[in-house]
Amino acid sequence: MKEEVLYFSEVKFWKEFKFFDPRFTFNLAKQTKMRKAAKGFLAENLSFQNHFVSFCLVSVNEKKGCKYYLDLF
């Protein structure tokens, strides 16, 4: 049986930086804020409460396009 997954994603746009990893923006404060939002969503939408929750980042770069970072925390 495949487990159902509910993805909470943040989309960020950055201009070109040579040595920048967008995953570093997911600090403890950001993680806490996203978990709180997910908890509120699940409290209001009981049909999703048995889903596995995954937090993701979509990085949009003006020169490189989109990059997806799944299951960050």
Image (cartoon, helix red, strand yellow):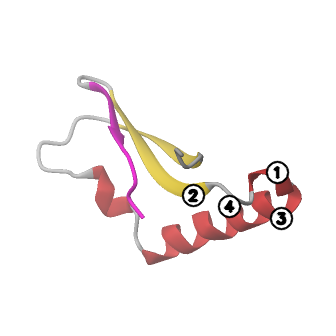
Q: Label 3 to label 4, Cα distance in Å? A: 9 Å
Q: Does residue 37 lie above or below 32 as drawn? A: above
Asked if the residues shown at circle 4 and circle 1 are in contact, with their CB atoms under 8 angstroms apart, the answer is no
Q: Does residue 38 lie above or below 64 as drawn? A: below
Task: Name the one closer to the observer, 56 or 63.
Answer: 56
Give residue 28's quadrant in the image.
bottom left
Q: Which of marks 4 and 2 is nearer the N terminus?
A: 4
Asked if the residues shown at circle 3 and circle 1 are in contact, with their CB atoms under 8 angstroms apart, the answer is no
Task: Name the one closer to the observer, 17 or 66.
Answer: 66
- Provide the residue designation for mark 2: 53
- Provide the residue designation for mark 3: 43
The residue range painted magenta reads 65-73
Asked if the residues shown at circle 2 and circle 1 are in contact, with their CB atoms under 8 angstroms apart, the answer is no
Provide the secondary structure element on which disc 4 rests.
helix
Provide the secondary structure element on which disc 2 rests.
strand
Asked if the residues shown at circle 4 and circle 2 are in contact, with their CB atoms under 8 angstroms apart, the answer is yes
Q: Label 4 to label 1, Cα distance in Å? A: 14 Å
Q: Residue 57 at what x, y percent from top left?
A: 43, 47
Q: Label 4 to label 2, Cα distance in Å? A: 8 Å
**Residue 67 shown left or right of residue 44 in the figure:** left
Q: Which of marks 2 and 1 is nearer the N terminus?
A: 1
Q: Label 2 to label 3, Cα distance in Å? A: 13 Å
Asked if the residues shown at circle 2 and circle 3 are in contact, with their CB atoms under 8 angstroms apart, the answer is no
Q: Label 2 to label 1, Cα distance in Å? A: 13 Å
| Residue drawn at 50 percent across, 69 percent down | 31
Give the crowd class for mark 2: few <14, some 14-19, many >=20 residues within 10 Å. Answer: some
Q: Earlier in the sequence, mark 3 or mark 4?
A: 4
